[in-house]
Image: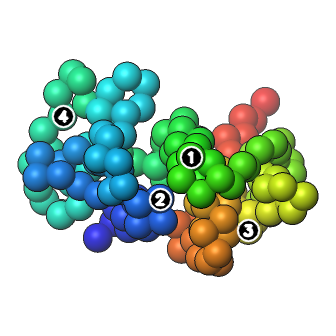
Amino acid sequence: MTNNKEFAIKMMQEIGLEITRDHHIVDQDTGDMLSFNGKLAKFYPEEGMTQIIHNGDVLFDPLDNQGMMTHLFSYFTNKLDTQDGRYVSTVFPSTQDKAAKGTISCREGQEIIVSDSYYKDSLKYGSLISKLNGGNDKFDEYDSAPIVNKRRR
């Protein structure tokens, strides 16, 4: 299984999402379909499966799609608020330098929760989701330094 699929499955488990027979992602608690930018999220966990993506679908890949992972974090924090009365606010990065590892933080009540340090922002959000669930999952195997193009003059 690829890193992208492993990470996607971990995030679905943390958030409480599952895959339907037609490969759409739904919330286990509400039955609502997960959407991103007006399209329904689809996921194919098995290797070698034919992936059927229609105009109204988007492939679920929170590891390499930063916007999707940010949306997933918002979805998760809204779910915490709605179902458990836990309000999470104020997400802020520790660094703006994409060439260095960094963290992101959020506030729940008076507590500040800090992600583990990664290059990829998606992993920082995944770390926060794990910590907000009371875990401390590590995602080092999915992280890699960005490729820096240095131009010679």
Rendered residue at 23%/61% (across/down): 45
Q: How is the image coloured?
A: rainbow
Give the x, y percent position of residue 43. 26, 50
Give the x, y percent position of residue 57. 25, 31
Of mark 1 and mark 2, the one earlier in the sequence is: 2
In this rendering, the label closer to the viewer, 1 or 2: 1
Q: Which amino acid, mark 2?
A: Ile
Tell me if mark 4 has few (under 14), some (14-19) or many (20+) residues whose alpha carbon lies within 10 angstroms of its own: some
Residue annotated with mark 4: 53
Rendered residue at 72%/35% (across/down): 151
**Residue 75 vertical placement versus 139 (above, below):** above
Tell me if mark 2 has few (under 14), some (14-19) or many (20+) residues whose alpha carbon lies within 10 angstroms of its own: many
**Residue 83 vertical placement versus 151 (above, below):** below
Q: Which amino acid, mark 1?
A: Thr
In this rendering, the label closer to the viewer, 3 or 2: 2
Q: CA distance from mark 3 to mark 4?
A: 34 Å
In this rendering, the label closer to the viewer, 2 or 4: 2
Tell me if mark 1 has few (under 14), some (14-19) or many (20+) residues whose alpha carbon lies within 10 angstroms of its own: few
Residue annotated with mark 2: 15
